[in-house]
Every structure is written in C-alpha cells, then in structure tokens.
Image (spheres, grey):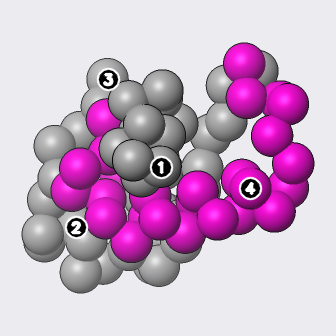
Amino acid sequence: MPDKFDPYREALVLETNTVWPDEYDHLDLSQKAEYESALHADPENASQLEYVRVHSGFCRQITVTQNDLDRISG
C-alpha cells in the first residue's frame, strides 16, 4: 500500500529505488534515468510512493505509473 508524502521521513531518506512495471520495458535506460530523476525530485506528487525502513534511515521507493509519466512529460 502506498504511503503519503512524509516530510519527516523525507529528511531521513538515504537511498532511492524506482520500480518499473513490465509495461515500460520498451523505454531505453537513458529515458528511464531521466524519468527517475524527475520522479525523485518531486516525490510529493508520485502516485505510488513507499518509504522502506533501512538500517540507517529510509529508502524512498517509487513505483512508476502512467499518471507519473504523463505528469513529468507534459
């Protein structure tokens, strides 16, 4: 279940991870890297955001959706 944006956890984010569903396999690595940068630069508006607890803080994990791609491409 996705989390809501949390400024407290954001301050403790030490890692990021992006989950790409199979439907986006057609995108090349440079496109994915560009989209990932845009998504993680604006985590508050990500459709599926999750904070995963790691030893020293949190990992921000964003699962890419079509709404996200439309938002950052538009």
Q: Residue furthest top?
A: 23
- The numbered dot on residue 9 is 2
Residue ID for mark 4: 31
Residue at (13, 71) in percent of width and height: 8
Task: Between label 2 and label 4, give the one nearer the viewer.
Answer: 4
Query: Nearer the N terminus, badge 2 or badge 1?
Result: 2
Q: List x then y, in percent, for residue 45.
A: 23, 50
Image mark for residue 1: 3
The three-letter amino acid code for the residue at tag 3 is: Met
- Tell me how far mark 4 sits from mark 3, CA to CA: 27 Å
The magenta stretch spans which residues?
23-51
SS of the residue under disc 2: helix
Three-letter code for the amino acid on which mark 1 is drawn: Ser
The tag earlier along the polypeptide, 3 or 1, is 3
Q: Residues within 10 Å of mark 1 (few under 14, many from 20)?
A: few
| Magenta region includes residue 43 | yes
For marks 2 and 4 on the same chain, the one whose residue lies earlier in the sequence: 2
Q: Are marks 2 and 3 in contact (CB under 8 Å)?
A: no
Name the amino acid type tagged 2. Answer: Arg
Quote the CA–CA distance across marks 2 and 3: 16 Å
